[in-house]
Image (cartoon, grey):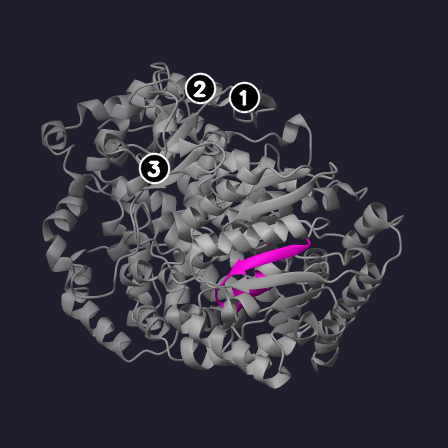
Amino acid sequence: MPTVSYSSKDRLVSHPHQSLWQHLSSVDEASAAALKGKVLSPDFFGEQEIEAIRRLLVYFHDFGKATDYFQWRITEVARKENAGLKGLDTAYVKDFARHPDRRTLEAAKDDGDLRGHSLIGAFIVQSPLPDDTSPLQRTMIYEVIARHHGNLKDFDDDVQRGAEHHQRTLVEQWAHFNHDDYRAILKKVGVAYAAELKGLQAAYRSIYFSRVYLELMDNKSLLPYLRTVFLFSLLLSGDKGDMMLRDRKLIGTVARLPADLIDRYKQLAFGEAQPSQMNAWREEAYQRVQENLLANPKAGFYSITLPTGMGKTLTAYNAAVRLQRVDPDCLPRIIYCLPFTSVIDQNAAILEKILASTDIPLTGELAKHHYLADWPDTRGGAGEENNLEYSEKEYLVEGWEYTLTVTTFVQFLETLVSNRNRKLRKFHNLANAVVILDEVQSIPPRYFNLVSDLFEGIHKYLGTRFIFVTATQPFLMRDATAVIELTDPTYVYTRELFERMPRIDLDLSLWLEGPDQLEAQIELFDIAVREETSRSFLFIFNFVKDSRLVFEALAARALPNVEYIYLSSAILPIERKRRIRQIKSSNGLRKVVVSTQVVEAGVDIDLDVVYRAFAPLDSINQSAGRCNRNMKGGATGAVRLFKSIRADKIYAPELLKKTERVLKAKLRETGKTTISEAQFYSLNEAYAVEVRKAVADGSATSKTILNHLYQLRFETAEKAFSLIEQEYITYGVFIDDPDRLPTVTHNDMSLTSREVYDRMVAILHNDELGRWDKKRELRLLRPALLQYVVQFPTKYLPEELREEAENKPFVRLTAEPGKYDYRRCYDLTTGYFEPDDKPTECF
């Protein structure tokens, strides 16, 4: 082939608009930025060790791109897509079409093995590694490079890693490798590789890897797992950072928040609030938490245990902001985790107000990460120079690059236990982070030991710190003494906080002696609403169908000056938001709310009387948190527990038994059928001990998954870990009724359900958009689309629609008579119903 007049390091092509040298140097820059400022334990990686490994991952992950097989295909694409060959060696790209072996290369261009570029790099990188690198670490580096375009695979003999399984690929790629060009690249960074392939083939056969697997069989440490996913995450961040960001300075940029940020906000928001006993208690608790944090600034685990309505959110944020300033050598991100997407917007709205309350520009420091969230348009402040392109939004939000990220338990915990490329990319940003877990009791007890060991590991090795926030600390950690309670490390004041609360009584009389049939319960509910005329009500059920039947029965009474409101997961997200605002509004009408558990965690509503179907104690506590939160008028609110004969269909029977046991023990102790809020602390403590001993410590689930992690069985662990267990099939349904449904805001425009759907169709049918362009536009539209989507269990969707719904993200139903009329199976007020359950006006 003809030669060119400048250094051959610039000849090889990586992408249609980018040389391989440009790509590798950019990945180097991006991964260095991702690692910069992170303080890791020397037991995890030494400072020089991690830097050396990072560089080798960068310069060998795309080693196979230097083969003629890859170059033949990529130069062909470049000539088609990059007319001026901008950014490339023009002569090289043009001349490659006349390659002496062009017939061989053309015949092989659809051969994925020969065109692949990861596998050969996983072998060749072994030669520049230091001689004392352990076989386990070599295998980890092999896996990170070999899988960087896919997902990590289990470390076992089912995966063919040995060189003899890839003989043809390795020999052919080596024979068609542009060694001079690639060595010119490596010379710039002071790296070299073996001159011969045979030695590496002989050294890294299946027997080599089998010895590593056998070594792992006796491993009881999470260190190999954490090291592997950290390296994988670091390489992914660099590789994707080159392709998705215009400016690599966006990586690793964290703002140090003002220490008094929350104090300033409180003064602006509540400075003129009327004094009250509750406000005085909130401020006292807030100050105590701050004092105890400053007295114990180096711990890894903190808890904030406060009764509901005591300002846990602001107190937790204040603690996190203060922790940001403990270590001058690093600048921690703050990651706030909540159990449900339904409360993330509420929490993030508070944060937005907090950030706006300071004269320091912090408007570009917050992101929400969940499937319904819009991505921020800017990073690091307002102004055109900070406007983000689509790929930059995706990279920054999904990589948790912001100073403050609000996300879900699912997103967070599935970052810890996964083999998946997309989930693990953000793992490295847990290093030195402050992680707040709000309503931590929502983690299923069967995973307590798994989560405890992972948290211990990432604190020990990555310097991550945790704040557990709840009204009912569940003894999550195996070593409870490792957790510092910030209200009072001795727990004396913590207990006093609960014991001074006179807001509610938990009435167990209906649970003990009341009816268990829904029809009889409805009559009792109706009597209460009719007779207690000055009180608002919230009824919480375990099953959607039960809640719907009760709502319809009560609403049919149509009492004067009463507003009936229904909430459940069967209601569209856009409508749920509207109804929560309706519950919180002061319009002079008495509220009667019927709901499922969707209102329990973090939904900031306050009613006088709460009826709760029997459930585990932590759910009962959450329900109680919606009752008389602000101690209005000095009156005592009532939480009334009633029977639920099918509760064991959705809750672990063991948790229900433990709840029954501690409730009845408390009744025997007091001789009453009511339990005051002042007794909740001791009640919850007894329950937590029972759960930790019988459910968490007795669970085989955590032990099994931990063994998978010890032995680097990434895929198997990921499949075994599921926070959301769904035992039935559901179908996505888009409800389109622009005349009756609220509008959604998208790109500062108010759109109806029909307009949102039409925009989706226009994107799909736009022939001017390529596949990736369509994907981008649909992702930006997705938060608006999903406001009108609800998941139907199988029996609620008409049978003739199920096959269609199986093959689509959702099927669209409208208000037009016919097959797709939503009124056959869905009511805008109460949600889905079995098609034969209700008469409909459309037939």
- Dot 3 or dot 2, earlier in sequence: 2
Q: Residue at x 21, y 28 (%)?
A: 1
The amino acid on which the numbered mark 2 sits, given as a three-letter code, is Arg
Q: Quadrant of residue 23?
A: top left
Q: Which residue is mark 3?
A: 837
Q: Which mark is residue 751?
A: 1
Q: CA distance from mark 3 to mark 2?
A: 34 Å
Seen as rendered, the residue at the extreme bottom is 669
Q: Which residue is mark 2?
A: 759
Q: Are marks 1 and 2 in contact (CB under 8 Å)?
A: yes
Point out the image quarter for the C terminus. Answer: top left
Q: Quadrant of residue 229?
A: bottom left
Q: Quadrant of residue 467?
A: bottom right
- Dot 3 or dot 1, earlier in sequence: 1
Pointer 1 local density, CA inside 10 Å: few below 14, some 14–19, many at least 20: some
Q: Is residue 60 magenta?
A: no
Q: Is residue 607 magenta?
A: yes
Secondary structure at numbered mark 1: strand
Q: Which mark is residue 767?
A: none
Please state the horizontal and vertical placement of residue 157, each as a whole percent of the image.
16, 65
Depicted 385 relative to depicted 222: above or below = above
Q: Are marks 3 and 2 in contact (CB under 8 Å)?
A: no
Bounds of the magenta segment: 602-622
Secondary structure at numbered mark 2: helix
The amino acid on which the numbered mark 1 sits, given as a three-letter code, is Leu
Q: CA distance from mark 3 to mark 1?
A: 32 Å
The amino acid on which the numbered mark 3 sits, given as a three-letter code, is Asp
Let me know if residue 189 appears in the view. Answer: no
Please state the horizontal and vertical placement of residue 52, each as a whole percent of the image.
44, 60
